[in-house]
Image (spheres, grey):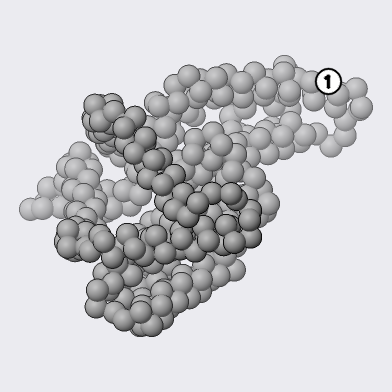
Amino acid sequence: MLKINSLTQSQMTQRLIIFYLIIFPIIAILAVFSWFFSTIVGYFILAMVFSAVLQTPTNYISQIQIAGIQLPRSVAVLISFFIFAGIIALFVLLFIPLVSEQIEFISVLDYNSLFEKIISPIDYIEKFLIERKWIKEEEGFLMTELQNYFLDFFKDMKFGNIINQILNTTSSVLIGTLSVLFISFFLLYEKGLFRRNIIALIPNAYFEVSISAIYKIEKLLSNYLFGLLIQMFSIFTLVSIGLIVSEVKYALTIAIFAAIANLIPYIGPILGASFGLIVSLSTQLQQTQDTAFSILAIKVIIVFLIVQFSDNLLLQPIIFSRSIKAHPLEIFTVVFMGAALAGAVGMIFAIPVYTILKVTALEFWKGYKEYRIFSKG
């Protein structure tokens, strides 16, 4: 490559036009393809993340020799799959006692007492509005309206459609899981297959700048995944210690849920804290007095507030600023764009996708400014 030390204004303008004429159609084609085949693209993205997680254990297992015979890579991939499935099974087993206790709690719940607790604040609000003459209704109208609303809601609900929706969702999840596993198997089995195929499609004129972009993308995404693992482990440790000290049942289970939920930016911490508060209170509702019950709720809230402050002030700046080199305002904007496009899934994958696009654009822009990669000669 010949580096450009000085260019005339007309040459810069010409190269700028050529740059945009090349880059914009490529971006448009990729965007249209991703839009129309979003399901397949999503499967590939999930498979790439999954294979990246299992890449290290697969490489290690494939080097093991038994009686002087090295394990085939296909066997190493399958063993990695089984190890991952075993870890997931352990997580599920942690939740089984909690789910069983919640079902038992619901089955023996005093619904009359619960109903009275619900009515009490509603009556208070109703009397407050009537006494100030903000409404001209008789006492009991609010509860009547709520009852009518729920009756209409369940009357209009078609349970046949709900069952069909559950079946469709289950089949979609099953098909998606099998698809991701199938793609992941070949990405792990054919080590570097995806990378080699991408490199093979790169024209010679753009080879070096593209290799530089791929290398930086892989490095940043690897740092980002490693940072997320550190973040999850840190949150799990802080939540579990805090809840154990607060004498909350199922502290480890709540901590695991909070660590996993935290992968969803902004919404995840709220989900984790809500789950922890509901579980901790419901599992001790019958054994705890009113005063102690309130103190327990305050303890749980304080634990999650401390964890959230630690995450926002220490963990996230380290992960986002150092791993992907992005400003917090960038992250905020990108995450909410992902949420608008694909909900919670979009929020999770917004940062990796943004990193890929950003690094690619910067590397090609650098190549445009410094090298003769867009010239015909």
**10 Å neighbourhood of mark 1: few (<14), some, or many (≥20)?**
few
- Residue 36 on image: x %, y %: 48, 19
- Residue 28 on image: x %, y %: 61, 21
Query: Does 33 appear above or below 357?
Result: above
Query: Does 346 appear above or below 226?
Result: above
Residue 84 or residue 129, whichever sits in front: 129
**Horizontally, is 365 left or right of 234 in the view?**
right
Q: Quadrant of the C terminus?
A: top right
Q: Residue at x 60, y 39 (%)?
A: 337
Q: Quadrant of the N terminus?
A: top right
Residue 239 or residue 10, whichever sits in front: 239
Q: Quadrant of residue 297?
A: bottom left
- Residue 276 on image: x %, y %: 37, 65
Residue 123 or residue 333, whichever sits in front: 123
- Residue 237 on image: x %, y %: 38, 72
Residue 302 or residue 151, whichever sits in front: 151
Residue at disc 1, secondary structure? helix
The amino acid type of the residue labelled 1 equals Gln
Q: Which residue is mark 1?
A: 14
**Horizontally, is 350 left or right of 58 in the view?**
right
Q: Quadrant of residue 258?
A: bottom left
Q: Is residue 264 visible?
A: no
